[in-house]
């Protein structure tokens, strides 16, 4: 058996190191290390609760609005109140635009370029992938970056800038959109639809959203599925079959995508009290705890029995996978369900995101059409001097939670579990691996890769299929 | 010229913002200016050992390096070891890599307020002992030291902002490519003057409210946010309202205050970001370059002269009273 230490692991957001134990041309065991600790939960202690709205978005420059929304909802919950209903719609709009932009960035800039590598030069699709996804100059990359920048004009208009807006508040949003704003946003969305239909899907978004089998030949989505078929990416990096979503885009009458836990082939409620962060293999000091009680105390000695700054979140003592696939499975999308039932590998995760891009386009258009411009977008009220609450949202990469406790008008406790904390956490005290660690077991490693110390291509596909956001992970 | 981009301890948001560059887009702009990315963690193909080889070649002087961009603060903790951020796969801290690579580069550019001054990563108790590349907050020093000068003759160029506007970064790179950025082009905190000689107040869409001190009392109201809501746009450097963000945006246009994110130590304002500290009912922290007595005199005069249109609109969430129209000339 040999060992490989992989890094710098790029085209993931932030810092990641993977250690592999390899035997007989396969990954025997994998260990995911998040090698960056900044300590946001500690920075917040003693601060005015409102400051969480400025500080927590800066945990992550790619999931910034997600962090913002989670902080606003946690403070709203601590106050026992809700956003103004139309304000919640604008917050959902901002958040959904970020999530779609992130999916686009992941597909075009982070995930697809791996297929341009010379190792795939003999494949029929290789010249097309090289033309589309060569880093920096690929035609698909450039089209996607341009479409993303134009889509983010919606955030410019309503949120001032992206990333790091302060527009989302516990009571709603800071800018009331007028009719002119709404028609402008409609125009931006139609332009984005044109990009999706001409480039990413090569057909109406409704047709892709309604897909029931992974058979699709047009656009860059078609190119991906051709590659997935050729390389059998459905069988690579299979998941644990347990998916969780906190429910996306909460409106006055509930979230636009449902909250749920999918296991043993069926969806049910999420036992939120059964969330706990295990720190047996994290450079943290303390006990396994629910985030409402948890602490973040760094083990500065970096003890040998741990290997990551990331805690290991568990639901009822077991790992769950989170992300776009999880959301679509829990929402009952037939293709997402079929993919999950086949093991939920690399193809399933990427397909989950593509389905979500198509479905979110429709959802965004409906959302904008429903906004009543004459309504109030903010219900201002002071935050309580004592209170506690949780803000649970769905970032692009999955379930994100903030748990806050306010005492004497100051933050007394703040804990965050990010999507990639769930997906890329280390082993727990039972020795059970986290989702990516488990998904990497069995991934092929060629003799050439092992000899040269090159990051195995299969490992790269599996890791990037999760779209990890490592800056959120440890925060 | 080539560019090596490192992401140290930050959020990656300055790269994400940079990808919002338009007309032309980022990669087209770099290509046409003769700038190439030697490596960028989010944008390049190379991974793992390939990156290590590339960094080692720069470290040994085998690959000449024109521009080193550093995005994110540098972590010195725990206990000065830098081990709160190890550059994965290398067994070395990012602090060590930055100290090793910076002297090899013709120009060193700190991108974002974390890299320039420590930024939000150094907020609160500064758990990871974060600092900027050549400043620790407002004090010169950082991990390279106050006396560091890159091979090209400039100190670390501080493109501060949280996040940075894509134009601030691309135009700094374009100036470097044109050999047109000199020490005179940098302000007292080493920020490029092309954006740091402006104030966020310039072209703020709330200027008329400001003129009459017609203030918003709560977020979502459209009046000036200086008096009550913590806005420091009259003191903060940046052309945010002149060039706008993501199309038409800016913080103040979206109805929330400027928090001075281009400045050292903005992360610890000493009060809530969205509330103006006051002494005897008067805001503490008045506009840059203005004598306090004059400001007070003008403010009380203009407040007394506030038209009803502005007073009412200031505390509304949209324009309630439009400007008065002039009748026909004859």
Image (cartoon, coloured by chain):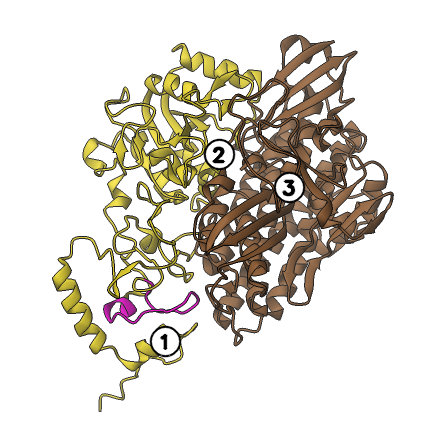
Chain colours: A brown, B yellow
Question: Where in the figure is residue A85, as x and y percent of width and height?
Answer: 59, 69
Q: Is residue B237 left or right of residue A437?
A: left
**Rendered residue at 72%/33% (across/down):** A435
Q: What's the mark number on residue B313?
A: 1
Asked whether the residues under the numbered discs 2 and 1 touch, taking CB atoms below 8 Å apart as contact, a structural biologist would say no
- Image side of residue A136 versus residue B292, left or right: right
- Which region shows up in magenta? B208-225
Q: Secondary structure at mark 3?
A: helix
Mark 3 sits on what residue? Answer: A419
Cα separation between marks 2 and 3: 17 Å
Tag 3 subunit: A
Determine which quarter of the picture holds residue B188: top left
Residue drawn at x 73%, y 45% is A274
Q: Residues within 10 Å of mark 2 (few under 14, many from 20)?
A: many
Q: What subunit carries mark 1?
A: B
N-term mark: 2 or 3: 2
């Amino acid at each position: 058996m040999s060992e490989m230490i992989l890094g710098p692991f790029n085209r993931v957001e932030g810092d990641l190191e993977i250690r592999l134990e390899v035997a007989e041309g396969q990954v025997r065991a994998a260990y995911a290390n998040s090698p960056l600790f900044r300590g946001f939960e500690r920075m917040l202690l003693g601060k005015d609760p409102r400051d969480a709205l400025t500080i927590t978005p800066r945990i992550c420059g790619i999931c910034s609005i997600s962090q913002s929304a989670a902080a606003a909802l946690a403070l709203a919950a601590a106050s026992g109140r809700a956003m103004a209903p139309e304000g919640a719609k604008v917050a959902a709009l901002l958040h959904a635009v970020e999530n779609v932009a992130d999916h686009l960035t992941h597909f075009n800039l982070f995930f697809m370029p791996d297929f341009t590598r010379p190792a795939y030069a003999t494949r029929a699709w290789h010249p097309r992938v090289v033309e589309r996804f060569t880093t920096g100059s690929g035609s698909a990359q450039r089209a996607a970056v341009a479409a993303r920048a134009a889509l983010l004009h919606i955030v410019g208009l309503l949120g001032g800038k992206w990333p790091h807006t302060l527009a989302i508040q516990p009571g709603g949003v800071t800018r009331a959109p007028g009719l002119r704003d709404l028609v402008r946003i409609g125009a931006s969305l139609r332009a984005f639809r044109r990009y999706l239909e001409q480039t990413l899907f090569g057909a109406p978004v409704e047709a892709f959203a309604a897909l029931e089998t992974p058979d699709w030949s047009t656009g860059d989505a078609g190119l991906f599925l051709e590659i997935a078929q050729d390389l059998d990416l459905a069988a690579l990096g299979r998941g644990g079959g347990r998916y969780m979503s906190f429910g996306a885009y909460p409106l006055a009458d509930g979230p636009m995508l449902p909250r749920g836990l999918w296991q043993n082939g069926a969806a049910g409620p999420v036992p939120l009290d059964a969330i706990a962060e295990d720190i047996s293999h994290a450079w943290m000091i303390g006990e396994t705890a629910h985030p409402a009680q948890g602490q973040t105390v760094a083990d500065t000695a970096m003890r040998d029995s741990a290997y990551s700054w990331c805690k290991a979140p568990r639901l009822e003592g077991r790992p769950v996978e989170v992300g776009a696939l999880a959301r679509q499975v829990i929402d009952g999308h037939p293709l997402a369900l079929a993919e999950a039932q086949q093991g939920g590998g690399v193809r399933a995760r990427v397909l989950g995101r593509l389905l979500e891009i198509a479905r979110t386009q429709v959802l965004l258009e409906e959302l904008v059409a429903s906004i009543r411009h004459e309504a109030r977008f903010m219900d201002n009220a002071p935050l309580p001097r004592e209170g506690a609450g949780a803000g649970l949202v769905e970032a692009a990469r999955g379930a994100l939670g903030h748990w806050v406790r306010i005492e004497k008008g100051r933050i007394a406790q703040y804990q965050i579990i990010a999507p990639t904390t769930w997906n890329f956490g280390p082993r727990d005290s039972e020795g059970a691996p986290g989702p990516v660690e488990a998904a990497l077991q069995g991934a092929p490693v060629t003799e050439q890769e092992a000899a040269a110390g090159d990051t195995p291509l299969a490992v790269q596909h599996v890791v990037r299929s999760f779209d990890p956001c490592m800056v959120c992970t440890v925060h | 010229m080539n560019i090596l981009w490192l992401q140290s301890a930050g959020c990656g948001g300055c790269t994400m913002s940079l990808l919002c560059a338009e007309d032309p887009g980022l990669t087209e702009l770099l290509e046409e200016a003769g700038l190439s990315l030697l490596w960028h963690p989010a944008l390049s193909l190379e991974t793992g050992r390939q990156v290590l080889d590339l960094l080692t070649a720069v470290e040994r002087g085998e690959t000449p390096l024109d521009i080193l961009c550093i995005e994110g603060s540098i972590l010195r903790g725990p206990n000065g070891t830098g081990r709160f951020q190890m550059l994965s796969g290398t067994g070395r801290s990012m602090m060590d890599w930055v100290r090793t690579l910076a002297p090899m580069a013709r120009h060193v550019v700190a991108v974002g307020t974390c890299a320039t001054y420590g930024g939000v990563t150094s907020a609160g108790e500064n758990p990871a002992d974060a600092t900027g590349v050549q400043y620790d907050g407002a004090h010169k020093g950082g991990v390279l030291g106050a006396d560091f000068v890159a091979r090209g003759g400039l100190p670390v160029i501080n493109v501060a902002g949280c996040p940075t506007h894509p134009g601030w970064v691309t135009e700094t790179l374009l100036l470097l490519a044109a050999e047109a950025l000199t020490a005179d082009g940098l302000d007292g905190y080493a920020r490029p003057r092309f954006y740091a000689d402006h104030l966020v107040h310039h072209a703020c869409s709330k200027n008329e409210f400001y003129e009459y001190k017609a203030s918003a009392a709560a977020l979502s109201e459209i009046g000036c946010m200086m008096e009550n809501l913590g806005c420091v746009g009259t003191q903060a450097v940046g052309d945010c309202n002149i060039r706008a963000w993501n199309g038409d945006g800016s913080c103040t246009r979206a109805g929330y205050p400027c928090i001075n994110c281009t400045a050292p130590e903005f992360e610890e304002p000493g009060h809530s970001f969205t509330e103006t500290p006051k002494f005897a009912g008067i805001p503490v922290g008045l506009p840059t370059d203005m004598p306090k007595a004059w400001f007070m005199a003008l403010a009380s005069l203009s407040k007394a002269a506030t038209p009803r249109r502005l007073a009412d609109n200031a505390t509304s969430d949209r324009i309630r009273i439009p400007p008065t129209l002039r009748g026909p000339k004859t």
